[in-house]
Amino acid sequence: MFSVTQKDGKKLDKSKYNWDEKNRVFSTIEKYLVLDFNEYDRVTFKTGSLCTFKTGDHCAFYTGGYCIFETGDSCIFKTRSDCAFYTGSDCTFYTGSNCTFNTKEHCTFNTGPECTFNTKYNCFVIRHDVIGVVEIPVDKKIKLNEFGTSGYKKIKEEIKEKIKETNCNGKVVVIDGKEYVLNMIGY
């Protein structure tokens, strides 16, 4: 059984979406949805923006921007900008700019500029603003350059540390937004 909820956790009224069981097509104009089709393969989704998807393999997505996708293998995505993808292998993406991709191998990306990629082997980006194809380095996180500038930058995974004094004369280390209190060790 699948579930469709609004961001506030309430189930979306069935009158606000169409589910064609025979052809496995889900469609709605609604935004801000959470769609859990985790146990479903071969589903086509047509939705608005700001949706979160959890699905199986061989799905197709036609959505607005600002969506989050957690899917299996062999999916096709046609979205607008600012989406995040956490997928399996053999997926094809047609997106706008500023998207983030965390995928396995054999994926093809037809995107706008300033997208971020973290992929396995045999993945390629097609960019039309600079007319070029980029092979994504294996196990390296990269971000495409801005509009009209070919290439990419490697992104280093850095631990951001910031030390500040506390009222108890201990030190607090902030690592990735979490605070840790350090204790002095006596000799």
Image (tube, rainbow, N blue to C red):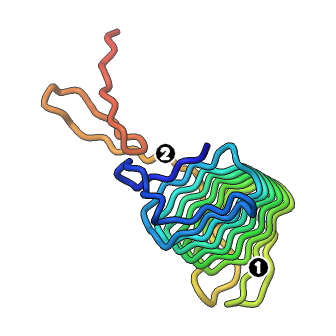
Residue 60, x across and y down, in percent = 71, 66
- Does residue 166 appear in the picture of this structure? yes
The residue at which mark 1 appears reads as 126
52 lies above or below 79: above
Mark 1 or 2, closer to the camera: 1
* Mark before the other along the chain sequence, 1 or 2: 1
The residue at which mark 2 appears reads as 159
Q: Amino acid at mark 1?
A: Ile
How far apart are labels 1 and 2 at the CA level? Answer: 31 Å
Residue 77, x across and y down, in percent = 69, 69
**Is 17 in front, or is 43?**
17
Q: Residues within 10 Å of mark 2 (few under 14, many from 20)?
A: few
What residue is shown at x 70% (from left), y 76% (from top)?
94
Along the horizontal axis of the image, is 78 left or right of 50?
Answer: right
Instruction: State the SS at label 2.
Output: loop
Q: Amino acid at mark 2?
A: Ile
- Does residue 140 appear in the picture of this structure? no
**Is 152 in front, or is 96?**
96
What residue is shown at x 64% (from left), y 86% (from top)?
149
| CB under 8 Å between discs 1 and 2 | no
Residue 114, x across and y down, in percent = 58, 75
Picture quadrant of residue 143: bottom right
Instruction: State the SS at label 1.
Output: strand
What residue is shown at x 50% (from left), y 53% (from top)?
4
Residue 20, x across and y down, in percent = 66, 63
Residue that extends furthest to the top in the rendered view of this protein: 187
What residue is shown at x 74% (from left), y 67% (from top)?
76
